Amino acid sequence: MIEYEEWQRQLRSLYSSQVFQNWALCQEIRLVDDKNALLLCLEPTHRLQESAKIIENKSLDHIELYLTYSKIYSEPLLLLRIWEEKCSDDIIMSRLMFPCKVESLLGVEGKFQLGLETFVSMENTVWYSFHPCDTSSIVGDQEEFRPTYLRRWTSIFVFSWLGYEDL
């Protein structure tokens, strides 16, 4: 568990650390000040591209991640949107993709609980969310871990399934 004020401090610290900016998959990053959140646009990993071809017979364009805070659980909350590359009349475009087996596509089955939700606070947009119910037991909320809580959370909830791979 992390208090909201500590979340804000650690989020700014994580952003300033350049860990995402230096990630080969990161195409865009933006600190959303009014929401105390972080928006990332990522190039899909090779593994994700292969999974999309096998499971969905589609090609991925990019992955959108939104790191925000759940006031209900007092935990970080990871939101995700998957964009597919679509070609129509020789025009390449991207559109939201809603895979039937999203956990299989992402390679997180049995590791994380995902749900599809509409977020009113984000202009009624639809996102997959990694449910934060077991976060403190996964990340560890002992007092000595508190100063690095968000960094540890990121390594588990983001890098463990996406990897910190080079292209």
Image: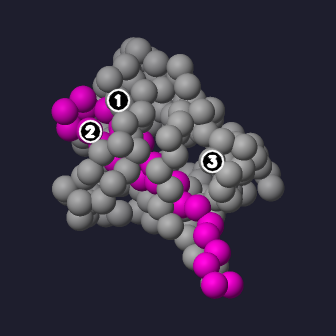
| SS majority, magenta | strand
- The type of residue carrying mark 2 is Ser
- The type of residue carrying mark 1 is Pro
The correct choice, above or below, for 28 with respect to 139 in the image is: below
Disc 2: which residue: 70
Residue 17: x and y in percent read 56, 52
Q: How far apart are marks 1 and 2 (CA)?
A: 8 Å
Residue 44: x and y in percent read 66, 54
Residue 73: x and y in percent read 24, 29
The secondary structure type at the circle numbered 1 is loop
- Quarter of the figure with the N terminus: top left
Q: Which of marks 2 and 3 is nearer the N terminus?
A: 3
Residue positioned most to the right: 167
- Quarter of the figure with the C terminus: bottom right
Q: Do the residues labelled 3 and 1 touch (CB within 8 Å)?
A: no
Disc 3: which residue: 56
Disc 1: which residue: 132
Q: In this view, does 14 lie to the left or right of 10?
A: right
The correct choice, above or below, for 27 with respect to 153 in the image is: below
Q: Is 69 inside the magenta-drawn segment?
A: yes
Q: Are marks 1 and 2 in contact (CB under 8 Å)?
A: yes
Give the residues in magenta: 66-90
Residue 104: x and y in percent read 59, 33
Residue positioned most to the front: 89
Mark 3 or 1: the one toward you: 3
Query: Residue at left 42%, top 33%?
Result: 114
Total marks in image? 3
The correct choice, above or below, for 127 with respect to 83 in the image is: above
Q: Distance between the residues labelled 2 and 3?
A: 31 Å
Q: Are marks 2 and 3 in contact (CB under 8 Å)?
A: no
- The type of residue carrying mark 3 is Glu
Query: Residue at left 64%, top 75%?
Result: 87
